[in-house]
Image (cartoon, rainbow, N blue to C red):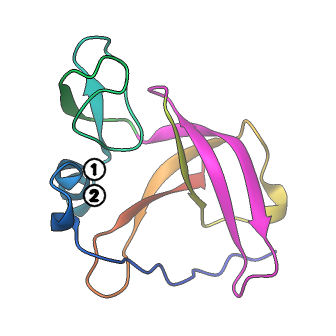
Amino acid sequence: MAYVQRKIPFVGTPETNPETKPFFDGCAAGKLVLPRCKDTGKFIWYPRAISPFTFGPVEWVEVSGKGTIYTFSVMQRADPPYAIAYVELAEGPRMMTNIVDCDFTALKIGQEVKLKFIQTEGGGPPLPFFAPV
């Protein structure tokens, strides 16, 4: 199945929630920036200002953008079709995302992927997606 880039809508603005602003600022700069618990050193997905592990402070750190497909599903009836997935980042957390720039029939669980930012519609920020290595 040949890949066709679909339109990515963005609702709201990155300024709507100050907790996630560092994440969206990183996306705008082409960097995947995630919070890391200052007490445990664990990275956190989804972006937030307080650690879910200790309810303590977090620091925002750029991550590698490397990961593996934990699980995925291809939405073949959509127009155009797309693949939604959980990607386990090299730093530990799993994030829900889309797999892009590939033949969906060739996707495999455990397959290595790399970060790719795709611009959203309507002046929204670019968002992180992943493509096979």
Relative vertical location of residue 17 with respect to residue 87 in this rendering, above or below: below
How many marks can you see? Answer: 2
Per the image, label 2 sits on a secondary structure element best described as helix
Which residue is identified by label 1?
31
Amino acid of disc 1: Lys
**Magenta part of the chain:** 65-92
Q: Is residue 77 magenta?
A: yes
Secondary structure mostly seen in magenta is: strand
Q: Is residue 50 magenta?
A: no
Residue sitting at the far top: 40
Q: Which mark is residue 27?
A: 2
Measured Cα–Cα span from mark 2 to mark 1? 5 Å
Q: Residue at x 37, y 85 (%)?
A: 121
The quarter in which the N terminus is drawn is bottom right
Mark 2 closeness class: few <14, some 14–19, many ≥20 residues within 10 Å: some
Q: Quadrant of residue 57?
A: top left
Q: Residue at x 15, y 54 (%)?
A: 18
Q: Are marks 2 and 1 in contact (CB under 8 Å)?
A: yes
Instruction: Give residue 119's position: percent from left, percent from top.
Output: 36, 75
Q: Which mark is residue 77?
A: none
Q: Is residue 5 left or right of residue 21?
A: right
Per the image, label 1 sits on a secondary structure element best described as loop
Q: Quadrant of residue 54?
A: top left
Front residue of this view, candidates 68 and 23: 23
Relative vertical location of residue 46 with respect to residue 110 in this rendering, above or below: below
